[in-house]
């Protein structure tokens, strides 16, 4: 058994040798010399363990957006104010003003005084002519010198002349309006009815606050006296009507805001009621005031206004207008300042809204000092300081300055309240 096993082993070795020899021939060029030990491979550097990732910070929830405050809707007065600022009398009518359907548009004007007085009454007439021309309407029909006692008849006669619109120039001839509106509903009725007039169905109204206006008139007069010298203004009016009393008290309040020693003296000249055209009476009052030491004159008049302006110019007495806003540019007569409540300016402001349908019958718009340039006071050639102080007076009124005193003035002028003590602004 052992002999056979050896022979098998020998044969196996022989086969192995043949295979080894064959492999040696193929790898001869890359045989490693036995006495040169192979360089040991450097052990691979152990990889540093990866840093554990920090957990992601939780995102803060986004702040909720605050809801936008809802804008309060504009009042009708604010809408009209904005529309007035963006329009003028050349804007093309967007509604048909031919209210009687005869193929033409005629504007009728009712004035309580002379149409050519150069003051309050003429202002509306001039505006009516400008508006009619700008709109391509017929020439306006004007009825002037209307007395309150015959206002109903005169307005009815105007309505019967085929007019489409009637502009009533003053509150003193407005009493017949409710009956006339009912009688002539197709006519568009507009009234510049002045201080404190109540809203009226069927009539588009423009109003103002006389106390506000005359307060800044007083400030302007005080500033002129401060420059020119003197301490007394004379207000020459008609017959102590309510709005004249309001004018006197508010003007005095404004003058004393400039200098407590300043004062205004009111002198009536006409026959009751509503006689603002009495030239003879106004001239007599002017001469009496001149002898008494008048330092500034406020001819609060209609037809008698310009004759007194001429007298003031002759005697070098500072003078203010009574309503008309264009006096600073006049060259025939000289005014030092203007009291601004020009019925023509009011009409120029609201008529673009009438012809666009934005200012309807039954609407009312009050022109306010400090907001609307149509009302207030204007010094014709002010110094920078005068302009700054007068601008501030307008702004003060807009912000409620002297509000309690204005209420007191109206209570005295229209309610018969007594004046217990000289008025001084409580918030001065």
Image (cartoon, helix red, strand yellow):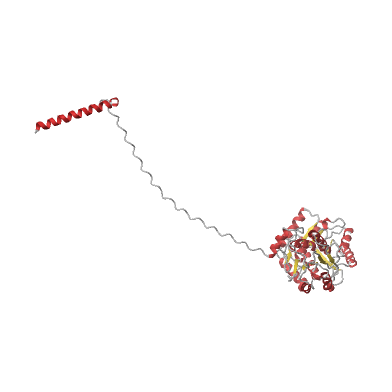
Q: Which of 102 and 108 is in front in this view?
A: 102
Residue 32 locus on image (x, y percent) = 28, 26
Tell me where residue 216 appears, x and y as whole percent.
Answer: 76, 61
- Name which residue lies at 12% across and 32% down: 5
The part of the image, by quadrant, that contains residue 232 is: bottom right
Residue 316 shown left or right of residue 222 in the figure:
right
Quadrant, the N terminus? top left
**Label total for image:** 0
Q: Is residue 231 visible?
A: no
Question: Percent x, y for residue 141?
Answer: 84, 65
Name, please, the residue furthest toward the left: 1
State the quadrant of the C terminus.
Answer: bottom right
Question: From what the image shows, is residue 170 above or below residue 18?
Answer: below
Of the pair 119 and 355, the residue shown nearer to us: 355
Residue 410 at least partly seen = yes
**Residue 397, how many percent across, how many down?**
72, 62
Residues 67 and 314: in front is 67
Give the quarter of the image for residue 190: bottom right
């Amino acid at each position: 058994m052992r002999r056979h096993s050896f022979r098998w082993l020998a044969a196996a070795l022989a086969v192995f040798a043949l295979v080894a020899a064959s492999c040696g021939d193929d790898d001869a060029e890359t045989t490693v010399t036995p006495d040169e030990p192979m360089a040991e491979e450097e052990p691979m550097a152990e990889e540093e363990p990866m840093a554990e990732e920090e957990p992601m910070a939780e995102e803060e929830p986004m702040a909720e957006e605050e809801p936008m405050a809802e804008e309060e809707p504009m009042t009708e007065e604010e809408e009209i104010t904005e529309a007035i600022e963006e329009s003028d009398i050349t804007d093309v009518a967007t509604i048909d003003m031919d209210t009687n359907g005869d193929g033409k548009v005629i504007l009728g004007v009712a004035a309580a005084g002379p149409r050519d007085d150069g003051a309050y009454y003429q202002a509306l007439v001039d505006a009516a002519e400008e508006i009619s021309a700008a709109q391509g309407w017929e020439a306006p029909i004007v009825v002037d010198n209307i007395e309150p006692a015959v206002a109903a008849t005169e307005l009815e006669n105007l309505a019967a002349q085929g007019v489409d619109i009637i502009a009533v120039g003053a509150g003193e001839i407005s009493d017949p309006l409710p009956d006339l509106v009912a009688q002539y509903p197709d006519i568009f009725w507009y009234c510049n009815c002045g201080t404190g007039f109540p809203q009226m169905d069927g009539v588009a109204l423009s109003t103002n606050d006389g106390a506000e206006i005359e307060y800044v008139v007083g400030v302007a007069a005080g500033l002129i006296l401060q420059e020119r010298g003197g301490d007394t203004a004379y207000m020459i009016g008609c017959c102590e009507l309510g709005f004249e009393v309001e004018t006197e008290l508010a003007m005095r309040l404004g003058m004393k805001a400039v200098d407590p020693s300043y004062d205004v003296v009111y002198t009536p000249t006409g026959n009751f009621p509503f006689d603002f055209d009495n030239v003879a009476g106004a001239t007599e009052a002017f001469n009496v005031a001149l002898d008494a030491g008048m330092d500034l004159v406020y001819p609060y008049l209609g037809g008698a206004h310009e004759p007194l302006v001429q007298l003031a110019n002759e005697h070098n007495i500072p003078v203010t207008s009574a309503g008309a806003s264009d006096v600073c540019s006049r060259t025939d007569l000289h005014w030092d300042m203007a009291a601004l409540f020009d019925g023509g300016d009011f009409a120029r402001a609201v008529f673009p809204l009438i012809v666009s349908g934005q200012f309807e019958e039954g609407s009312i718009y009050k022109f306010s000092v400090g907001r609307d340039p149509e009302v207030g006071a204007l010094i014709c050639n002010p110094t920078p300081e005068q302009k700054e102080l007068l601008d501030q007076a307008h702004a003060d009124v807009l912000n409620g300055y002297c509000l309690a005193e204005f209420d007191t003035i109206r209570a005295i002028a229209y309610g018969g309240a007594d004046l217990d003590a000289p008025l001084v602004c409580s918030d001065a």
